[in-house]
Amino acid sequence: MTTVGEFMTTRLVTMDGNDTLVAAAREMRDSAIGDVVVTNGDDVVGIITDRDIAVRGVAEELDSSSTPLSRIVSRDVITVSPNDDAVLAADLMRTYAVRRLPVVDHGRLVGLVSMGDLAVEREPQSVLADISADEPNN
C-alpha cells in the first residue's frame, strides 16, 4: 500500500480568507502554482484555484483588489490523512469531482495531493504523469 504521505506535496501556500483575489493570483504567479489553501489558523477553510479567480471573480466582475477569498472559496473541502491509501485519495477525487485534496494530520494541514501527484505515483508512464513531473513553463 502506498500512502498519501509518501508522495504528497509539502510545499504549500496558504492564505487567509480576508486576503484578496489579486493577492492570491500574485502568489500563484510568483510560486508557479494553480491553487492556494485558505485557512483560518490551523483549520482548512477551502481551496482557491486560478480557475476560481477567473470564473467566480473576474467573470462576475468582482473587484479583485478588494474582494476577499472568503467570497469565492470552495468550502466543501474533502481531506485525507497522510496515512490514507493512494487508492482512497483517487477514489475521493473521482467521487467528489475534485483535483486536489488537502492532507490533514491531527487537525493540522501538512500537505496537498493532486491528480498529477497521483498520476506520477500510480501511472508514471501516463501523459498526465509526464506533464505533472515537468517543471512549469509559464
Image (tube, grey):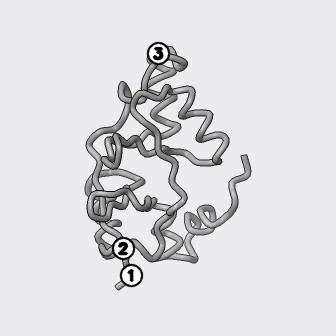
- Residue 13's x, y, as percent? 52, 48
The residue that appears at 51% across and 21% down in the rendered structure is 58
Q: Amino acid at mark 3?
A: Leu
The residue that appears at 26% across and 43% down in the rendered structure is 76
Left or right: residue 53 compared with residue 33? left
Q: CA distance from mark 2 to mark 3?
A: 38 Å
The residue that appears at 41% across and 73% down in the rendered structure is 5
- Residue 135's x, y, as percent? 69, 60
SS at mark 2 in the image: helix
Which label sits on residue 108? none
Q: Earlier in the sequence, mark 2 or mark 3?
A: 3
Q: Earlier in the sequence, mark 2 or mark 1?
A: 1
Q: Amino acid at mark 2?
A: Ala
SS at mark 1 in the image: loop
- Residue 66's x, y, as percent? 49, 16
SS at mark 3 in the image: loop
For disc 2, the neighbor class at 10 Å (few under 14, some 14 to 19, many from 20) is many
Count the marks: 3
In terms of depth relative to the viewer, which is nearer, 99 or 65? 65
The residue that appears at 49% across and 69% down in the rendered structure is 119
Q: Are marks 1 and 3 in contact (CB under 8 Å)?
A: no
For disc 3, the neighbor class at 10 Å (few under 14, some 14 to 19, many from 20) is some
Q: Are marks 2 and 1 in contact (CB under 8 Å)?
A: yes
Which residue is under mark 3?
62
Which residue is under mark 2?
86
Which label sits on residue 2? 1
Answer above or below: position of 24 versus 104.
above
Q: CA distance from mark 2 to mark 1?
A: 6 Å
- Location of the N terminus by quadrant is bottom left
Q: Earlier in the sequence, mark 1 or mark 3?
A: 1
Q: Amino acid at mark 1?
A: Thr
